[in-house]
Image (tube, grey):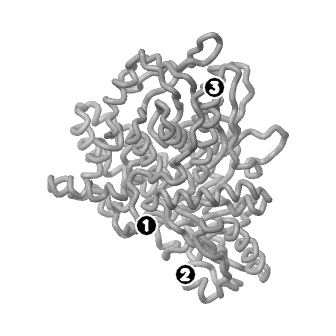
Amino acid sequence: MMMERNKMISTIQDTDQVWDVVIVGGGASGLGAAVEAVTRGMKTLLLEQHDFTKGTSSRSTKLVHGGVRYLAQGNISLVLEALRERGLMKQNAPHLVKDQSFIIPSYNWWVKPYYTLGLTAYDLMAGRLGLGRSLPYSRKRTLKNIPTLKQKDLNGGVVYHDGQFDDARFGINLCQTFVERGGTAANYIKVVGLNKTDSKISGVTAIDGETGERIDIKSKVVINATGVFVDQIIKMDAPKSRDVVCVSQGVHLVLDKEFVPNEYAIMIPKTSDGRVLFAVPWHNKVVVGTTDVQKENAELEPQALEEEIDFILETAGRYLTKAPKRSDVKSVFAGLRPLAAPTGEGKKTKEISRGHKIYTSEAGLVTITGGKWTTYRQMAEDVVDTASKVSSYPMKKSITRNLAIHGWKMNVDLNDPLYFYGSDSEKILVLAREDKNLGSYLSKDLGIIKAQVVWAARHEMARTVEDFLSRRTRALLLDAKESSRIAPEVAALLAKELGFDSNWEADQVEKYQTLALRYVLK
């Protein structure tokens, strides 16, 4: 089945239909829960107020990892869970998840023995799902693999292996997997109320963001998987509920590949603010981050603080021969982490566990919060178990551990600009061959051709210029100025494909270019 929004909306408009489960939120936890539910035979509806993975789930450090930092904190159970799930993500979506070698540079005599020992334990915990052995590297070998490291006092490094992926693309492929299995999903549908029968939740009221239509939807159970916004949904059910989420912001800067020119990533395990800093190769650029700043309020389009930008540039400059300047930054993006709020006072956000929590209200609202991309599948399994109990749906065994994600393809060529489409890449090239115009570049630097826009509109439910340039491709995050340049052509292609007029086109370009300015450092 194709991901056609109009068909999905007509299914949702059938007010006689009773869904086994309605999932609110189209990020990692919501999409994972949707796949989990539909593969157990549940009639499942997924609603997203904006676009799939618009929030936190498209703004990660692009790592699929067990969590070296959690190992240092002694959170063994979370590390074991994440290492298992890391291996399953690579197995189930090899076109999007790859092995990434990291080097921890050693500028003190104790760094190599200390981290070699700790990371060997990390490898052993991964078992047969491990990605490679951790080893000490000599100074010469370290510099061969990362020639841009500062050489003064460098005595070598420690290499270890984790996963690297494209978060938004993984989300889109999860949504396609869900729809192919018989699920119904729609973006730009905002849940504005929870409906109750005999004081128990029996559905939702939602508004179609494109038409303004109000729709009442019946459901046996509702899962609240709205990330940093879960408290808003909880308060629709019980206005006096305490907040279950605390929000932390992480910022990333994107630089040209010259700063870390080979395929190795850098990991600095202890920065001045006590976090780790990564410099990770991604789509022929380098993602550097992250920060951890507590935020009062959740927002859809968070903005990097000047102090966060300065911190990343200054910390990266301590380790790289060429210190990155503001003018070197191609894009800056901020994401908000939905951390399960601690019950104790005064805990810093970086100390709060990345484990997930599930709450069930008296009225039967099931809420999931916390967690991270790597453990999305286990989170989904747990929350659907809970939802099944609440709705008295027969408990069925999960099959998602070995479920291939849409686009599954082994041995993709990372030099192919379309590699992240997996098995869909050939279909995009067929479009380009059928219409020579669609084979021409929108951006040669980013490797984006016109056929990708048509594909995104027809098969990936892209509804706006931002959907395409931020999440169907990653242009906004890779080079904000370049993405802004090609926005008018993208708008024209989308308008033609989706049947929108020239006013829509002009409005889209203006909105997108205003947004893109927020990703450019002044």
At horizontal 46% and vertical 57% (from top left) the residue drawn is 93
Total label count? 3
Residue placed furthest toward the top? 198
- The secondary element bearing badge 2 is classed as helix
Residue 511 tag number = none
Real-space CA distance between mark 3 and mark 1, rounded to the nearest whole angstrom:
43 Å
Q: Position of residue 436 (x, y in %)?
A: 15, 56
Q: What is the three-letter code of the residue carrying label 3?
A: Leu
Residue density around tag 3, few if under 14, some if 14–19, many if 20 or more, within 10 Å: many
Relative vertical location of residue 134 with respect to residue 484 in this rendering, above or below? below
Q: Earlier in the sequence, mark 1 or mark 2?
A: 2
Q: Amino acid at mark 2?
A: Asn
Q: Residue at x 45, y 61 (%)?
A: 94
- Give above or below for 328 relative to 213: below
Question: Picture coordinates of residue 472 (x, y %)?
Answer: 38, 48
- Is residue 283 in view? yes
Residue 498 vs residue 230: left or right?
Answer: left
Read off the residue under disc 3.
365
Residue 148 on image: x %, y %: 56, 78
For disc 1, the marked residue is 284
* Real-space CA distance between mark 1 and mark 2, rounded to the nearest whole angstrom: 16 Å
Question: What SS does tag 1 mark?
Answer: loop
Instruction: State if disc 1 and disc 3 touch (CB < 8 Å).
Output: no
- Mark 2 or 3: in front is 3
Q: Quickly name the residue at label 2.
A: 145
Q: Which one is earlier in the sequence, the residue at label 2 or at label 3? A: 2
Q: In the rendering, at what x and y percent does residue 160 appear?
A: 63, 73
Out of 444 and 90, give the one closest to the viewer: 90
Would you say the residues marked 2 and 3 are in contact, meaning their CB atoms lie under 8 Å apart?
no
